[in-house]
Image: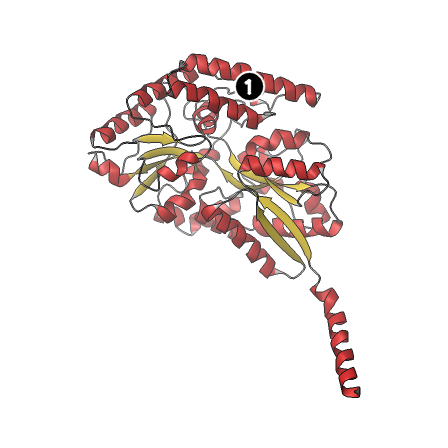
Amino acid sequence: MKIQSLALTSGLLAVALSGPAQAQTQIQWWHAMSGPLGEWVNDLAKEFNASQKDYVVVPTYKGTYSEAFTAAMAAFRAGNAPDILQVYEVGTATMMAAKGAVKPVGEVMTMGGAKFDAKAYIPAVAGYYTAPSGQMLSFPFNSSTTIFYYNKDAFKAAGLDPETAPKTWPEVVLAAAKLKASGHKCPFTTSWISWTQLESFSTWHNVLFATQNNGFGGGSARLAIDSPLHVRHFENLSNMAKQGLFVYKGRDNKADVTFPSGECAMITGSSGLYSRVSKEAKFAYGISTLPYYPDVPGAPQNTIIGGASLWVMAGKKPETYKGIAAFFNHLSSPEVQSASHKRTGYLPITMAAYELTDKSGFYKERPGTDVAVTQMIRKTTDKSRGIRLGNFNQIRTIIDEETEQIWTGKKTPEEALKAAIQRGNDQLERFQKANKL
């Protein structure tokens, strides 16, 4: 009995002593990454969790960007918001206006005793998530931009030079015509039509998408997507659609699957699509810059940020913020950033990570993988810095709805764009009034 009692006492003592040492702070991270990108997110959490013993990051997939955003807002109102929320770039203005809902990333890093220098980040990336006061509000995570992919094997079969990507929209039309003549049923498509064909298209040509410098100059911004250049571009896309040269594959990133599968020979989409293309494509492919109109003065200028950033929600315990700071510090390291950039096609968010990737020979081994970076690090103008509008998610949906009327022949490009402006401006006015801007 004494031996059993001693053993029991020793066991309880061991548990008591080991309890505090094993206590770890859990950090809930809601995200919108699926497929290969979801695997990447999970691996990032595993790497951080294995690197230290105090914190455990728990990533949870919450659906698409818009679904994750909606779920998080509902959770915040219910008092059970996650610690970290991945928010796509169109939700930035809404998050900035959500007073009391978030804690600025700069504050979080300071609380955690982590080094944080906003100047270390690529300016076009850091600037988008920085308030007028100069305070960085969210942590740049999967930053992307719009680029052009093409199927080299399909080009060769169509009699096109597989090593020469079409750089201009007239060249895209000519390439699409030859691809169709060779039997290709989907010569060109695009994902995220508002982002690729209006937002990035505008900054790439140094024209405004919206007034007030695309929203950076104040809350009274209104859409400006019915300029002669915008109308001309959608008239060209409309003509391509009628001829079977452009095939619309749906909203958001629905078209993404059609390129690595070989269904569509050319696509404009996110640099983040690289992770899927590099893994799934069974053909030789090329990566190039976004097409432009050569007769537009100053074009090409620069493309703008896409993807998402990580927002820290308010009302959490100090220990949670320390853990978040440690996690963000881990994600910021040049080694982690470079590895993520190589794996996903997302931008290396710091110049140190870009330089490390360059020195490794990655860009020489895989031509085109530096396109996203070189498009983004160009000098910006007031018209090309980025686009930051309230209710941007609703505006994108409106643009989807109106431009779909073009592909079905129910509206002319000019009618559709003007309708998008009217409906989109209603959303901007609502946001302005609701937030007293």
| On screen, residue 16 above or below 211 | below
Total numbered labels placed on residues in the image = 1
Pointer 1 residue: 424
Q: Quadrant of the C terminus?
A: top right
Whether residue 220 is visible to the viewer of this picture, yes or no, is no
Q: Position of residue 216 (x, y in %)?
A: 60, 24
| 308 horizontally vs 218: left or right | left
| On screen, residue 342 above or below 234 | below
Q: Position of residue 427 (x, y in %)?
A: 60, 20
Q: Secondary structure at mark 1?
A: helix
| 155 horizontally vs 20: left or right | left
Whether residue 130 is visible to the viewer of this picture, yes or no, is yes
Please, what is the three-letter code of the amino acid marked with disc 1? Gly
- 201, 38: nearer the viewer: 38
| 428 horizontally vs 414: left or right | right
- 84, 329: nearer the viewer: 84
Q: Residue extending furthest front? A: 1
Q: Residue at x 33, y 42 (%)?
A: 261
Q: Residue at x 62, y 53 (%)?
A: 57
